[in-house]
Amino acid sequence: MPGSPGRPGLGMSPEAPPTPPAPGGRAPAFGTVGDPDAWAFSITGRISGIWQVGFGRTPAFAASADQPSGVPFHSPPRIVGRSPFWVGPGGTINFQYGNQVLTAFVSLEAGFASAEWRGYYAGQYGPRIRTAYVAVNPPPFGDLRLRIQVGAFPANYGAPGPWGWGLFGPVLAIHGYGGTAVANYELAPNLNLYLEYGLAGVPAVDEAYARGTFTDWPEVGISTIVNHAHAGLSWKNKYFAKLHLARAAGRDLRRFLDDDPATPNVEFGRDGRIDVAALETRIVADPYGQLGITPVYWHFKDALFVHDGIWWGLDWTAGGREMTNKFLGPQSGGNGDIVAVSMEYDFSLVRILRYPQPFDGNGQDLRVALAFLPYWTLKSADPAYDNKAGYFVGASLEHVMLSWLSGVYYLFGESRAAATTDTGAGVLTGRWAAFSGTIGLALHSDWQSQDRITIAYSRYFYSGFTDNNPVLPLDRNVLTIGGSFAF
Amino acid sequence: MALRLSPELLCWSLLLALAAPAIARAQTADEAAEAEERRVPRLGLDIAEPAVRSAPPATAFGVATASSKDSVLDFHGYMLLPLNVGLLRRENPPPGQDGTVFHTPPLVPQDYRRFQYTAVLPAPWIQLNLDYGNSRIAGTIILAATAATEAEAFYDPVRQLGVSNAYVTLNLSDKVGIPLQVRGGAMQLRYGAMGAFDAGRYATPLIARINAIGETATASFTRGFATFIFEEGFGGQIARPPTGFPSAGWNDFADPNVGSSYVGHLHGGVNLAGRLQFGLHYVGAWSRDDMNVAGVLAKGSIDVLGADVRLTWGRLGHFYLGAAHTWASNAGVVAGVIEILNARGGPGLVAEYLGPQSGGNGGLTTVGLQYDFSVARAMFGDRYRGRNPDVLVSLFGIGTKVSSDDPMADGKLKLKAGVQATYLMKAWFGVSGRFDHVRPDNDFNRRAFTIYTANLLFHTNWLSRDQFALQYSHFVYGREVYVASGFPAVDNPSLTPDNDVFSLSVTFWW
């Protein structure tokens, strides 16, 4: 429930899956304090099987060429923009062994890779060990508590939601081999100081590595090191202010094997970096829910030469590549500045209405999450993107009618003032926009259970620039059926 | 009336069976003692011992775990996760480039499959052992990976090993009256383990590693202070690259020239008073397959005969000395059912030792030793239980002499040796230093290199199962030390290897 205490620390728990919350904003409290007993083994995880079909339109050439016409069905649907459903991995099993001082964590993940589900074997969805780390929580030194974590894990910061991913995710997400060290010091009663430093490295991949769909990895693989530091204060566990700083630096000779100026085609490489500064502020105002506001600033310098140590910003980054393509412009060379403000408000309507009577979530309710994320490209070397803006908007409502039934409603939108698309006949630049509305029903085993069986219908709306290819029109109507279970 | 066979007859007739983890069935003190008497000794590493490609802490994997007569789930694991960063100075950085280069992974000559490998740099390894069973029978699945995709940022199917071992262990000790276990399934067996509990500082089995689906049987009997141990096994790989199969990164560069390959192995040993153990090992791998491009019957073999001695004696520490000779005949057609000094099958043996003109014919004579010594245990004997400061010293080395039909490889002597000292000064802190020298070709000093390594070690307690390490390694190279690049990687003389490597790693086992 909004207002409940979360995991101590400056970022999300790495155990939290990179997925939107369940309908209505429910999120399992991954990483919160567990059983204080001695050595214990536990298995947690998440299982999901979600199927989507998009109902398309007859391509333009079919009608003109007297070809068969009608409504084509697409799985996966041919849609763009944010989706309320994460079709992602089929299952994640988390193995955890340890005690309150020392914990080992390994997650095993697999998608629906086999031909039974796709008609072919999709290697990139095959089973893999995804996350593995060891965490140490030494006994407190007076008012000082420490946590050290080393291994291979994600570290996410600046998500304005109460727990987990939220509607639009964190503004800074880091992964790689490395570690973090967190200090939590009680400056005064109800006033806590958080300090954190982290180091992560993403290994290079040789240029000769055969890129293929089975790798799920198309970008350049330059050795990238991420240094990140964080400082924060919390007051009464209700008011939070956290500063997040990070730098991802890509420097690697292996990509540039020849230092001979006579071969500039080989010698084009530069050292790149991405700098991030974010100020995360959150207020937990029971019974009115939680409001989070995170302004963030990105500075990109030759960011195309940075691997994805920072893997999420406004969107999936693929290092510097996707932030460049979507927000700086493909002609920018990965140079420019972006600012954004990520906001999310989560509340329970019944909790507000019943106040001062308590409401623990076990009853009829309307759970709401609202998010808005405007951004501005302050500077870009691509004139078409320089000084342009855009935004993301989202809303998630769950009307909990019965202990086993909810109505779910979503609105998602994404608009970018500058975008580029290659139609084959030429490169076009214009406003990119995609919006969707979703209505559905969710079955669950109890008021606050983490299991869902969902059926939903989504209607998508696109700008003419977004849906600009009459030969391959985007789907406007999408049906979603599936289930998920976290344990 | 139970059938009782003489131990000797039984041992010789056991060469058909399967093996189970050492699952103690003890419920009472008497039963525990009885179970200990019937514990099956081992001549090689336990399958559950992590196949980590680095020198791991000494870990007692494979010891008795489950003690229930009812079936239970048992869970063990191991993880080593490092961040390794190699540093290199650009001599004349052009505009837009800094003077310092980061290499992750470091650009150093440390290929696991080659003799140059020292295991001094930690490499990722994650392993989960899931056992289900009881004191009589158990099934084991081992999940493993050499990378965590969260950190690699892409999916490399070759590094996600999936189910790396799956086998059933049947403990027949109660039935036959002597320790006897039989295993069937897919198992990776390692012989010539130089460490007390692991494959040694070089993470390299000295005699052979076997990757086969089949069976093994282990039995022993005791006469006085001597315990005689016998082990056998037979198996093979379940497939070979089909004719016309492409060699590519996603299939770990399948070699279309190798055929269906099989392996049989016999081992015998005697353990004296639990302190001194002698072992004799024979491993024979072969291929006879006509499913190749030429459509002709291609016959090849790799045979290994080895002997080793292991002394484990309190104050004197742990000492291992082993020797092996490998015969290769048209070995290029033998697949990775056998690994010699980590070289995979015949193609690996040809590439690293025998030479491309050898036709896969030749041999290796290998000697290795490791000595591990605890100063505190030497001073205080069994009164020292590892819960006070200590200095640990290890000496280790491997040498192999090549005989080959390839004149460029024939007569080559490859040597590597090192020493490591570790001072555990606090329950939570220790320091360690290691020196390694590698001579891939003893006739050429310019191909040799030296590694100096220093570590800061942090752990949660004496004898804890965790370790956080900050490591610095300095490499000093001869003029002709090359590192590999490309995919598949080959030596690239145009590359300058890294001189300095920093590492942050964590190790945890349970």
Image (cartoon, coloured by chain):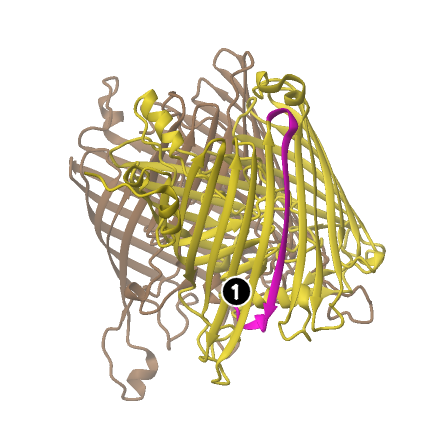
Q: Is residue B160 left or right of residue A65?
A: right
Q: Amino acid at mark 1?
A: Asp
Residue found 28% across the figure and 70% down from its top:
A56
Tell whether position B328 is magenta: yes
Residue A314 in sight here: no
Chain B representation colour:
yellow
Residue B340: x %, y % from top left: 59, 58
Disc 1 designates what residue? Answer: B252
Q: Quadrant of the N terminus of chain A?
A: top left
Residue B381 in sight here: yes
Residue found 61% across the figure and 57% down from its top:
A386
Work out whether residue B80 or residue A133 is closer to the camera in this orientation and state it.
Answer: B80
The chain ID associated with circle 1 is: B
Q: Quadrant of the C terminus of chain A?
A: top left
Q: Which residues are magenta?
A: B314-335
Chain A representation colour:
brown
Quarter where residue A181 is shown: top right
Per the image, label 1 sits on a secondary structure element best described as: loop
Residue A277: x %, y % from top left: 60, 39
Quarter where residue A196 is shown: top right
Residue A33: x %, y % from top left: 40, 25
